[in-house]
Amino acid sequence: MRAKADQKVLLEGPVLRSLVKLAVPIVVANLLQSAYQLVDAFWVGRLGGYAVAAVSISTPIVFFTMAIGIGFALAGSILIAQHFGAGNHSLVNHIAAQTLFLVVSISVLLGAIGYLLSPYFLHLLKVSPEVYEGAQGFMRMSFIGLVFNFSFFVFQSIMRGVGNATLPVYIVLGTVVLNFALDPVFIFGWGPFKAQGVMGAALATLSTQSLAAIIGFLVLFRGKYGIHVRKKDFIPDWGHIKKAFALGFPASIEQSMRALGLTVLTFLIAGFGTTTVASYGAGSNVLQMVMIPAMGLSMAISTLTGQNIGAGNIERAARVARLGASLGFGILTVLGILAFFTAPALIAFFVPEDPAVISGGSKFLRIMCLAWGFIGLQLSLTGVLRASGNMITAMVLTLVSQWVLQFPLAYVLSHHTGLGESGIWWAFPIANIMIALITMAVYAKGDWKKKRLISSKEDELTTELTQEITADEGILK
């Protein structure tokens, strides 16, 4: 009954209210997730520069593998949203379990490979002997925890797909508070717990993420929040696994290539000296905070659009897309204007005592911030494309943005004009505006309206699953 009530609100209620109902908890959860890194940075910073370097070296590699899990979680969310919108609640439960099975299997494989190859990664990065031990411990512990990270990503996606984005917020909030308490215990030692140094930060995160994953599984098995998985749902269904993989693989490539693109851009920036790197780092911190609401809105648009496509409400899905794109453009434009006038203060928050970095970071921020509205527009419309199952299109748009537009522009403008490092900064707004216009053209073409992931064969499977559940309940009675 609860699932049907949530479905009615999201498919028939006011579009703005439905978007806000989904977007706000997603944004809050994403903000809380970012707090994990802030908490670790706070406590690890007390160990000194070598410890901070160990975490900094390890984080991009771990994030690169986590991006793969996020891609498959997105695929599961879209499949669930369309079936939820179509009222196929039995199949929603089945798909949730199959997505978990797929993502957990991938995470175990990636975690094992990452654990074994950690020393090779560090040698490749030419890590100094003083940093090596801490970096290897942190990296290996992070790879062990990959299965729990991936599992919770999927749990969040499942909850989002059925329109319940609030519950994960409470779980993440609790684990962030617990992580803040466990970090000093594992890092510095206390009572029976020996000091683990840098590895202690990863161990604390592993403990809290595993707890979050376990709670997520309990919620899914108890069936009180719009979804109820059973043990038999985890028996491999290769048809659904193949479909989830086909959707998730392009999304994983998209997320990982986005992370890799930023890493490559960092190498280009490093050629202009330490001050330029620090200016980029401070400006990027501001950009990352702005991206959190933009990504939250994109996820909400994707979920709500997917549900309406599944229900056959294409016109309502188009209204969600138009309103979402307008909100994305408007909200981020306002944030960009505010950032333009407060740039020095924003940069000084991260680097309070370095006038050169404050000046350089402010210049970077002011060049790129007035185009933030186009980032919001592009992310919102990409969410619509994903919702219809056009994962390859979304992937191609990201690859074009990163590798065809932004990086080549940054190189040409910084090395073959008189702009210097400012050429890298100008590549951001130019690329963002161009890819937003391209995405608008793809959206306006309207092919996304013609694609639906639900087949008549799956409708038959829904009937079979419903009959099985009814039979099981009859036996239990």
Image: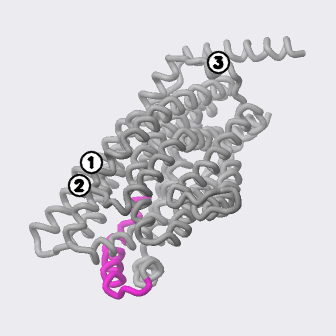
Q: Residue at x 61, y 15 (%)?
A: 461
Say which label, 1 or 2, has the lower sequence index: 1
- The colour scheme applied to this rendered structure is one colour
Q: Amino acid at mark 1?
A: Val
Q: Main secondary structure of the magenta part?
A: helix
Badge number at residue 462: 3
User: Could you say where residue 167 lies in the image, as x and y percent from the top left?
Assistant: 70, 48
84 over 456 or under it: above or below: below
Q: Quadrant of residue 52?
A: bottom left
**Residue ID for mark 1:** 400
Identity of the amino acid at label 2? Leu
Crowding around mark 3 (Cα neighbors within 10 Å: few <14, some 14 to 19, many 20+) is: many
Residue 405 bears which disc, if any?
A: 2
Q: Earlier in the sequence, mark 3 or mark 1?
A: 1
Q: Earlier in the sequence, mark 2 or mark 3?
A: 2
Cβ atoms under marks 1 and 2 closer than 8 Å = yes
Q: Is residue 361 magenta?
A: yes
- Residue 65 point in image, percent of width and height: 42, 43
Give the magenta-colored segment's residue range.
352-376
Q: Depth check: 154 or 23 in front?
A: 154
- Provide residue 416's location: percent of width, then percent of height: 9, 67
Above or below 103: residue 197? below
